Image: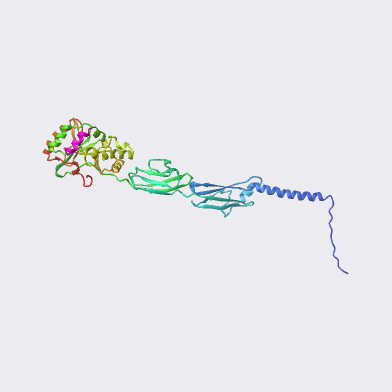
Amino acid sequence: MRRGVSFVSVSVGRRAIPVVAGIAAALLSLFFFGRAELRAASPALSWSWRPSTESILLTAKPGKGLLRDWVWGSTRWAGGHGLVSRDPRRTEQVRPGEDFRALVSLRGPDSVARMIDLNVAPLPTFSVDGSGQTLEITSSQPLDAVWGMPGHAGPWAPPDPTRIALNEAVKAQSLALRVQAASGERTTWHVAVPALPTVPVIWFGSPVGGSVYITLDDGWFPNQRLLRLMRTRHVPITAFLIENAVAEHLKYWRAFVQAGGVAEDHTVSHPELTTLSFDAAEQQWAGPLAVYPKWLGAAQPTLGRPPYGAVNPEVEAAAHAAGLRAIVMWDVVWSPGAGFKTWNGGPIQAGDIILMHWVPGVGKAIQHLLPQLAKENLHPAPLTSGLPSGLVN
């Protein structure tokens, strides 16, 4: 007896067909609905360029819909940088001056990727010129702001966006200038600012031989009596003259120089130099140096005396920039009616620098001073002879 093969047949009635079709349609709808929900729940990925830190900020945000929380909690940065839900931002450093191209992505139930293509501008670079009296820093890019500039508490916008000038750096400084270019680039540049050269300030002359030094300031009131005293007794007088005063009495000051007087620098118009800018103070010092040799037939001044005795490192540096070799002060002062007053209240001593002014009565005061000095074995000497060598012509 042969074994046969039996078949089982299943028949579906016509009434069951709609049920099957409904189930299939429901499954398809659920599938497409799920895909739509998955797409809606997909995180959003964005990036922004931050020139101030030379970096790209990557930001992820959760999507929408019913699957939002599930997708968000299951998504990670490609490369394993932690859950986006806990750290939705990521920073990528970028090298200045190079092209940056990278594919950034999020991995999860529905992956997201974006291509970043960026050309990064180079950082500002500088060249420095310190050959003159100013230190000039030139930038390769126009600058919007500078932090750390002397005299500026906050950000400072240079008038020339490609050049920074430091012309009042009397003291040596180490500066950390933070700059921001017009492109948004920021960098820090360390600048070593050398000190501007200054001239020495002298208060006393040499006491050798019992010498004292008579100096007269200003020049508005020429004194004929003193001029005769200089001619007959050869009294050495150093005059620190105001240029504007000399211009009004040229004939007298030429005679003063011919009688052996020495004309030195008391500025153009007698301002308080400590209140002026560096450039303005330099111009005040420089005026007499330019005109006295032509006007008076005298040597160019090498010594200066600041009006009102107002001196500071900026004034000393401006004197050097103008071409002077020293600033000469005083330790004895004469005034009409009060006579001579020394720095310590004692008698005039060898080495004293005596300050007087071209005022009525100054010739008579010096005539009376000469025998008093002789009694103390003191004698007037040219100021230039009492100063260190190298400070005078």
Residue drawn at 12 percent across, 37 percent down: 233
Picture layout, residue 368 above or below residue 113: above
Residue extending furthest toward the right: 1
The x, y position of residue 127, in whole percent, is 40, 49
Residue drawn at 19 percent across, 41 percent down: 383
Q: Is residue 365 visible?
A: no
**Magenta-colored stretch includes residue 254:** yes
SS assignment for the magenta stretch, majority: helix
Magenta residues, start to end? 249-261
The x, y position of residue 385, in whole percent, is 18, 44
Please identify the quadrant where the N terminus is shown.
bottom right
**Magenta-colored stretch includes residue 322:** no
Residue drawn at 65 percent across, 48 percent down: 39
Q: Is residue 233 visible?
A: yes
Please identify the quadrant where the C terminus is shown.
top left
The image quarter containing residue 220 is top left
The x, y position of residue 239, in whole percent, is 21, 37
The x, y position of residue 117, in whole percent, is 55, 51
- Nearest to the observer: residue 383 or residue 26: 383
